[in-house]
């Protein structure tokens, strides 16, 4: 059974690695962005309980999966169900460069132009990764990784 959690800063390469694993191991893929946010403008986080209910349903419907995102508060409650944990931590500079090169994500944005309108805000958010104290922070990701007692790996670059 393959159940893989991938997390890190925005732009770290989570979605790219998740797609590689999805294709290589025929896993079901869940991008936590789909369950973390209300469909509102501006976007608002869903209640944690509601997001976790949706994640649990995904896990119960799929024996083999890869779940990826930057939400330590959503990953921590399901970490014990993972067979492997991957922390992608290539550094802020690499994350920013990856975001600048990111292809259009049609499941998140109506157009490439709409996606690019958020780029400056996203870069500012990425720059604050090491200083924040929230569920998206380096501090929260490090704690999640350090507490996991199973098979785990930390990648400090996008070269694997």
Image (cartoon, grey):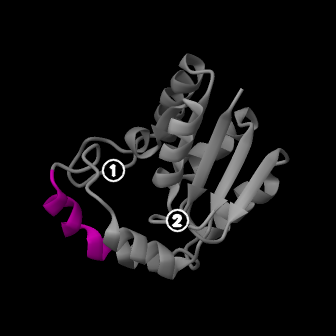
Looking at the image, which residue sits at the far top?
A: 61
> How many residues crowd mark 1 within 10 Å: few (<14), some (14–19), many (20+)?
few
Res. 153 in view:
yes
The label on residue 132 is: none
Instruction: Specify few, some or many for label 2: CA neighbours under 10 Å numbering under 14, 14-19, or 20 or more.
Output: many
| 82 relative to 129 in the view: left or right | right
Residue extending furthest toward the right: 149
User: Secondary structure of the magenta portion, mostly?
Assistant: helix
106 and 23: which is toward the camera: 23
For residue 9, the mark is 2
Q: How many marks?
A: 2
Find the magenta span and give its range: 111-121
User: Residue 23, percent across and down?
Assistant: 50, 37
The percent coordinates of residue 36 (x first, y second) are 43, 44
What residue would you read off at disc 1? 44
- Where residue 82 sits, quadrant-wise, is top right
Residue 100: where, in percent of width, then height? 32, 73
Cα gap from disc 1 to disc 2, whole angstroms: 19 Å
Which residue: 52% across, 27% down? 53
């Amino acid at each position: 059974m393959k159940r893989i959690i991938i997390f890190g800063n925005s732009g770290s390469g989570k979605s790219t690695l998740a797609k590689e694993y999805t294709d290589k191991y025929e896993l079901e893929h869940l991008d936590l962005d789909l369950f973390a946010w209300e469909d509102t403008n501006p976007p608002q986080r869903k209640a944690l309980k509601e997001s976790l209910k949706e994640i649990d349903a995904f896990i119960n419907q799929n024996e083999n999966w890869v779940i990826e995102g930057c939400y330590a508060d959503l990953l921590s409650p399901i970490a014990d169900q993972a067979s492997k944990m991957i922390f992608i931590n290539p550094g802020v500079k690499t994350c920013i460069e990856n975001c600048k090169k990111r292809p259009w994500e049609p499941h998140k944005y109506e157009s490439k132009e709409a996606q690019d309108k958020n780029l400056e805000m996203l870069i500012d958010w990425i720059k604050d990764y090491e200083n924040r104290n929230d569920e998206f922070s380096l501090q929260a990701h490090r704690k999640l990784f350090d507490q996991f007692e199973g098979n785990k790996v930390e990648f400090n670059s996008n070269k694997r």
